Image: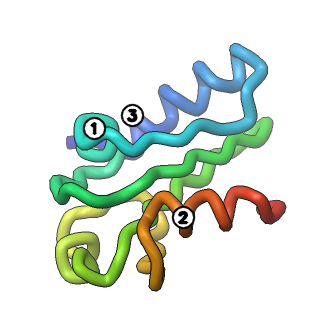
Amino acid sequence: MNYLARQKKLAAALRLGGFDGAAGHALTQRFYLCGFTGSAGVLLLHVSERAHKLTFYTDGRYTQQADDEVQSARIVVGKRAALIEGAKAHRKPV
């Protein structure tokens, strides 16, 4: 599957709508955008005029699975729950 093409399509739609990012935590969103099939993870997509950056957050239980499955996204394995790690990172400028 071409996850990068899917990410680019979403990023273009967000730009068109005037948004600078999106978050997703549902299993179907994670699988569709990066290939992860596990039950715990959060995606944050940051969009600029010319590029996008997808970051996948999960916890230590899914380190190996994330390494095996996640494509076209930066992986962050946090010490806390994925939602907390993603929210904490979202407060900081990218």
- The crowding category of the residue bearing disc 3, from other C-alpha atoms within 10 Å (few below 14, some 14 to 19, many at least 20), is some
- Secondary structure under tag 2 reads helix
Q: Which residue is labeled 3 in the image?
A: 6
* Amino acid carrying mark 2 in the image: Ile
Please determine whether, in this image, residue 22 is positioned above or below residue 12: below
List x then y, in percent, for residue 92: 79, 64
Q: Residue at x 23, y 51 (%)?
A: 35
In which quadrant will I find the C terminus? bottom right
67 sits left or right of 80 in the view: left
N-terminal label among 1 and 3 = 3
- Secondary structure under tag 1 reads helix
Q: Give 43 or 54, whichever is nearer the viewer.
A: 43
Q: Which residue is labeled 1 in the image?
A: 32
Disc nearest the viewer among 2 and 3? 2
N-terminal label among 1 and 2 = 1
* Amino acid carrying mark 3 in the image: Arg
Please determine whether, in this image, residue 84 is positioned above or below residue 45: below
Q: Which residue is labeled 2 in the image?
A: 84
List x then y, in percent, for residue 36: 23, 55
- Secondary structure under tag 3 reads helix
- The crowding category of the residue bearing disc 1, from other C-alpha atoms within 10 Å (few below 14, some 14 to 19, many at least 20), is some
Disc nearest the viewer among 1 and 2? 2
**In 3D space, how far apart are the residues under numbered discs 1 and 2 (Cα atoms)?**
22 Å
**In 3D space, how far apart are the residues under numbered discs 1 and 3 (Cα atoms)?**
8 Å
